[in-house]
Amino acid sequence: MLTRRRLIGAAMGSLVLPRRASAEHSFSAAVTPAVTQGFPVALDATKTFFVDQNGEPCFGSGESPQLIVEALSNSDTLLYLNDRASRGINLLWMIVADNKDGNNPPLDSNGDAPFSGADFTNFNEPYWQHVDFVVQQCLARDMTILFMPFFVGITSAEGYHDSLLAASTARLQGYADFISTRYAAYPNIIWTLGGDADCQNATIYSQIDIFARRLKANDSNRLITMECFNSAGGTGGRVSSTAGTKVGLGSVPSWLDINWVYTLAPNAIADAQRAYDAGLPCMLGEDNYELENLGNGLTTQLQLRTEDYGSVLGGCVLGKLLGTGEWAFNQASTGFAVSSPSWQSQLNSQGIQTHQLAAKLFRSRAFHKLRPDTSNVVMTSGASRGAVCARTSDGQTVIAYLPNGNETVTIDMTKITDTGSQANCNWYNPQTGAVTNIGTFSTSGTRKFTSPDSNDWVLVADSEAAGLRAPGS
């Protein structure tokens, strides 16, 4: 297992949106009004981007409160969810059953275990009522849960690795039936399998495959993704869902709907582009975390911003999850424990603030139409120095992220489609959200753009005739 666990549908001929939950397992709690937002419930008919509860394109701005079920009381859960909803967060990764991390794994904060006997059976009702509470409170705040039924781990020393190996087909299918039935009415769930699951272990992958096939058979419209690990390759073992399942199962399984990108900051752009080329819609699920030290110093804010912009412009148009110091909620066995700042003190961290600004920018443009400029035909110079670019499929918008200060990139202006042959160009400050207008230029030839100072910047070039609002507004 890594230093800690981390972190963004079915092929639908016609779009089928899951229904809202009924009042069974209902709980009352005060709800802080969320930023007006949709939450991801399905993929569009072309299987390219998320759509929300109203069938509209939906950008996934997420976070990774992995141990929220195990670590937090109901009141603390509401504190956390209210804050994140107010920031436009609409996607949360939660490990629903965990027997490795936390103060008393696999117990929750009430002292209840998910299973009363053998793992994946004898479901303990008080524990699952607490899960119900979390699911319902997320739904009330327009948040989708990346619902991980069990965290596998790389080796037998981690997670439910050994229990998964020992489980019979009937037991795995029984657990899949249990969660499929219990949460059938909730539209705000995406099944998220694996969890550092090593694709070099074919038996582990075969067991996950049994579980996943049953989930998909029970509800063909429910989206499924998977976090994979490769002890023999990848970015420090981190690989995408498609890369991992190709090794572990021999091919990409039909039940896999979303390509979960698992990477580190230096490789975020390349790994996102590689995952995009694999054909399934992508989200960045896990990368460097705020307050994390992987042996070469704490993750920097520049690395977090590079992950935010580099992954989406690299092809992860479903969205991106931010990893913050809150993921473990100061649980003693996780490495982000009692010596770390309290999770409450990190609710307004610099990382979450700039993550919000990234989401605001992408939501202010046709993010769902963005296509990565992997061949450097739009941004003809700059990629070799770390810049990354994407263009909407209709040519209305070009966005480029320049991580290095005082950097110059060259844009082929003919790639911007405008009836009057004019492009409105702006700099967007990823640290503050401030917009600086550069000017209006002809959509002919090429043009060099140099970032305003020594910080990272985002270049946004739009069709003038489109009349789009200011970036991020």
Image (cartoon, grey):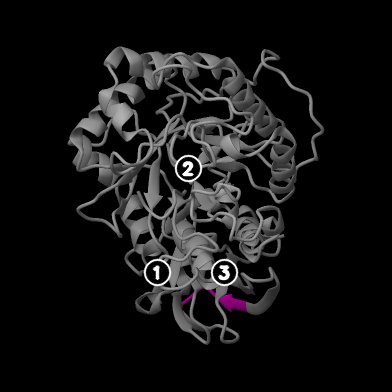
Q: Position of residue 136 (x, y in %)?
A: 67, 27
The image quadrant that residue 468 belongs to is bottom right
Magenta-colored span: 440-444
* Residue 269 in sight from this viewpoint: yes
Q: Nearer the viewer, mark 3 or mark 2?
A: 2
Q: Position of residue 284 (x, y in %)?
A: 45, 51
Query: Where does label 1 land, which residue?
Result: 295
Q: Kindly identify the amino acid type of the residue bearing the numbered disc 2.
A: Asp
Name the front one of labels 3 and 1.
1
Q: Which residue is mark 2?
A: 101
Mark 3 lies on residue: 461
Q: Quadrant of the C terminus?
A: bottom right
Q: Is residue 45 above or below residue 396?
A: above
Report helix, strand or loop for mark 2: loop
Q: Position of residue 192 (x, y in %)?
A: 44, 35
Q: Secondary structure at mark 1?
A: loop
Residue occupying the point 48% across, 24% down: 14
Q: Image quadrant of residue 23?
A: top right
Q: In which image quadrant can residue 260 be found?
A: top left
The three-letter amino acid code for the residue at tag 1 is Gly
Q: Between marks 3 and 1, how big is the CA–CA gap?
A: 39 Å
Determine the residue positioned at 37% across, 16% down: 217
Say which of 153 and 143 sits in front.
Answer: 153
Q: Please indicate whether residue 341 sits to the left or right of residue 239 in the image.
A: right
Q: Toward the viewer: 452 or 212?
A: 212
